[in-house]
Amino acid sequence: WIKFEEKVEDGGERWSAPHVPVLPLHSLFQLRTCLEKGTMLLDLDAPCFKEIIDKALSGQPEEAELQPELRERLAALLLCQPRHQPTKSRLQHLTELGLSPCQGNSKRWFEPRAQLSKTPLKEQLRNQFKKKVPPGAEAAHVAVGEVEFLEKPFTAFIRLRRGVSLGSLAEVALPSRFLFILLGPRAKVKAYHEVGRAMATLLADELTVLPPGKWDPSARIPPPSCLLSPHRSLHGHETTQEPAFARPLSLARQSRGNGDMAAAGERASLGHLHSREELERTGRLFGGLLQDIRRKAPWYGSDFYDALHPQCLSAVLYIYLATVTNAITFGGMLGDATANMQGVLESFLGTAFAGSIFCLFSGQPLTILSSTGPVLVFERLLFSFSQDHRLDYLEFRLWIGLWVAFFGVVLVATEASHLVRYFTRFTEEGFCALISLIFIYDSLKKMLSLADTFPINWQYRLGNATSYSCICNLSSLSHSSAGNDTPFPSPLAPWQPLTAPAALSKSQCLGRGGHLVGTSCQYVPDVTLISFLLFGGTLLSCTVLKHFRSSRYFTAGVRKLVSDFAIILAILASCTVDAALGLETPKLLVPNELKPTNPARGWIVFPFGANPWWVCLVSVVPAILVTILIFMDQQITAVILNRREYKLQKGAGFHLDLLCVSLLMVVTSITGLPWYVSATVISLAHMESLRKESETSVPGEHPEFLGIREQRLTGLAVFILTGVSVFMAPVLR
């Protein structure tokens, strides 16, 4: 028992899953009788197990006192080394089975009748249960069974004054505090076992008794995910303690109670921002910004050395893959939407620059900057508007970005971020749903457009393979050039055999004025089919592997490894899908010369010259819309990341984050790079990859969540690697 009961599975090789103990009511009555009639020693001072046994045997009531011979035999039996259940890993078991096919010849770490050791054995110190026991815990020992030389049961309950190490008695090397012994004739072996289970349950946790009824004693009830306190209600008022026989069956009621508790916690989380000091107004210009800087400055040094942990290395790899594929995807979409005025190369450079600056100077460095769906929609509309009204897109965009940066600084100066106090969970979820729908719509639209570019050849018949052909007809060119000195022969002329020019490529043929003739000239590869197979197969595989984490196969470590592999598989598969969708990423990454994707533009956008002078004034109107969009996108993401449930210790920086995003708008607009704002999905993934959990957790319960490993180094490393990836075109290809 470690809070919940575990049984040795059939075969005696491993422990069962933790479950709620189910006890017959009769076993409690028998336990009460044993405690009333047996030996009871409370606050006993004894330094070793032998002295405890001697005092227990000599402290019996007169009517139950044992004969000296029986007492010696009983003492010798109790002082034997217990045969504990081995807690070896499956790898150790497989190794032992391979070395010794006969299990009966396997060597145990104790002799069958060896005497109890006064010091813990090495196997006890290495026991895997040690890490599951919380600090300060003490052990209780329950020894029950049948003895052939006893005619009546012997019962003893001992409570030591203080925890004492009893050598090799305990399965785990812990100080012992309680002992219960029940030995008797063979007639009632099962009864002894149930009495021992009842005592072990009482020593481990509060007791819940099932009322009389047709209950299957072999049924195992899994531990509830959340236990309500029996002493206080949700609002802190005292509650009436139900008697043992009436408290029980309400595992269904208890689960409903857990749901009520979770709902109450959810309601409480809706108002989690109303009392945050980060959002209190100071009434001074830039007052909130100055408070953010004062709050975050003392933590700046620790934001780097707190990252010196192996968990941060895995987080960098995970978020790097997510960021790179996101940059590829959005770069391709921006290239399609803006005639390659912004492409994958610009997306990589902008992500690396903006993300690095943000991680160095922001108030919440766990945030990951990226292009988002709403910004992509605005870029598409802005380019279309510029084309319709014959305006230079990048110059028009530059003025909008400058106005957005100005409005952002004004919002920071006036402490407008305090408005996020009134964002509800409905607002957050609605905005996240909008972003998700934009992603889904764009991806499905791209997938469906493949059917037009690469139509599936439904008329293909394998039996007609010999009749399929496509050759270049240059006969018209040959006839028109009859007056020339060197006429070009036609490969399709009936009076002339097929010659080498028939092997011309499609572009060469059309370039020479010919045309294609044949039944397979319109054939295209099955890009559409393979893309849908990749799309659906990736989704199905990753869904199955994600659910595998909570399955009962293998150990928790193996399941977690497989689940993480599923995430990486999804990311890598998305690269393949993006390539299949025609994004042509390798052509857009130029490792030798950092030239813009579109040769018609440069790396600096000039504010005047291409558009009329009044465009800088008209840009105010769309800039207001973009400001609202950026403010909502940035602050809602910040609200989600800074929830109380994440137990962040270094505080938030709503005003400082908004200032960083606003100033980055100036640089990205002048250089023609994409605009960046906090990406909700990747930022949440970054937070989840840095979760800290307790190493000691009771079997059957999840490890205690301790918080997030707050630092700046993982995000900074991710964006530096993203910038270096520009020169990794051969690898990414």
Image (cartoon, helix red, strand yellow):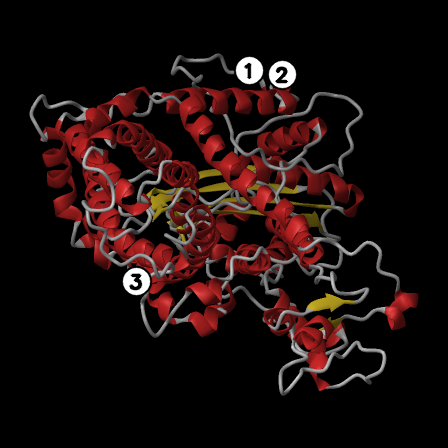
Quarter of the figure that contains the N terminus: top right
Asked whether disc 3 touches disc 1, contact meaning CB atoms under 8 Å apart, the reply is: no
**Secondary structure found at label 3:** helix
Residue 519 image position (x, y, % from top left): 82, 64
Cβ atoms at labels 2 and 1 below 8 Å apart: yes
Q: Residue at x 27, y 51 (%)?
A: 354
The residue most toward the left is 284
Identify which residue, 67 or 168, lies in the foreground. Answer: 168
* Left or right of residue 352, residue 576 in this image: right
Residue holding disc 2: 246
Up-down relation of residue 136 to residue 99 (above or below): above
Q: Amino acid at mark 3?
A: Ile
At numbered mark 1, what does the secondary structure look like: helix, strand or loop?
A: loop
User: How far across and how far down the image is residue 558, in percent?
Assistant: 58, 60
Q: Amino acid at mark 2?
A: Ala
Q: Farthest front residue?
A: 483
Residue 451 in the image: above or below residue 466: above
The residue identified by callout 3 is: 720
Q: Residue at x 78, y 47 (%)?
A: 186
Q: Residue 242 shows which numbered tag? A: 1
Give me the C-alpha separation between circle 3 and circle 1.
Answer: 61 Å
The image shows residue 371 at horizontal and vertical percentages of: 38, 45
Left or right, 417 with reference to 267:
left
Q: How many marks?
A: 3
- Residue plotted at (58% across, 47% down): 446
Circle 2 packing at 10 Å, graded few (<14), some (14-19), many (20+), is few
Quadrant in which residue 727 is drawn: bottom left
Nearer-the-camera pick, 121 or 322:
322
